[in-house]
Image (tube, rainbow, N blue to C red):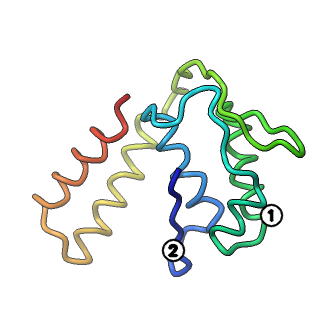
């Protein structure tokens, strides 16, 4: 499992960690039964405080992806696909539109964005 962080990013480090691990989980690259690095190991590897990694792991456990065992680490668990709550499609559309607008405002061409969106969707399909 390779996790990278960007200390200059707007997104907090714990969220960057959680987002990357979540992507590995939903794509099937991390399967039930897999053990993740301990909080301490990953914190040392990334050069961050262990509470940062613990927060990321805790969020993923709250989402039903991980089982946390003190002194042992985090284990990927079987998780049934949740039913999207009412309004989730609209909320996602608004977040995606804002991200696309931000990318366009920074100069990325439309075709580059389309290719990136397709690649991201394909990468996450199990």
Give 2 or 113, whichever is nearer the viewer. 2
Which residue is tagged 1?
A: 51
- Classify 10 Å Cα crowding around label 1: few (below 14), some (14-19), many (20 and above): some
Q: Tag 2, which secondary structure?
A: loop
Q: Quadrant of the C terminus?
A: top left
For residue 12, side relative to residue 4 (left or right): right
The answer to which image quadrant residue 15 occupies is: bottom right
For residue 100, side relative to residue 69 (left or right): left
- Classify 10 Å Cα crowding around label 2: few (below 14), some (14-19), many (20 and above): few
Count of labels shown?
A: 2
Which residue is tagged 2?
A: 6
Question: In percent of the image, x 53 and y 59: which residue is there?
Answer: 3
For residue 32, side relative to residue 106 (left or right): right
Question: In percent of the image, x 51 and y 74: which residue is there?
Answer: 6
Proximity of marks 1 and 2: CB atoms separated by less than 8 Å: no
Give the x, y percent position of residue 55: 75, 56
Give 76 or 62, whichever is nearer the viewer. 76
Rendered image: mark on residue 28: none
Q: Tag 1, which secondary structure?
A: helix
Q: Is residue 37 above or below residue 121?
A: below
Question: In percent of the image, x 36 and y 44: which residue is there?
Answer: 93
Give 58 or 75, whichever is nearer the viewer. 75
Give the x, y percent position of residue 31: 54, 29
Q: Gap between marks 1 and 2, in whole Å?
A: 17 Å
Give the x, y percent position of residue 13: 62, 67
Q: Is residue 112 above or below residue 25?
A: below
Dot 1 or dot 2: first in sequence order is 2
């Amino acid at each position: 499992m390779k996790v990278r962080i960007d200390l200059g990013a707007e997104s907090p480090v714990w969220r960057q960690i959680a987002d990357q691990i979540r992507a590995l989980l939903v794509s099937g690259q991390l399967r039930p039964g897999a053990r993740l690095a301990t909080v301490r190991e990953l914190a040392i590897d990334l050069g961050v405080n262990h509470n940062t990694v613990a927060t990321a792991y805790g969020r993923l456990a709250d989402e039903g992806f991980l089982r946390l065992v003190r002194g042992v680490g985090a284990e990927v668990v079987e998780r049934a696909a949740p039913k999207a709550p009412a309004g989730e499609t609209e909320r996602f559309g608004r977040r995606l539109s804002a991200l696309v607008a931000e990318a366009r405002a920074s100069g990325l061409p439309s075709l580059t964005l389309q290719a990136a969106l397709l690649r991201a969707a394909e990468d996450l399909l199990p």
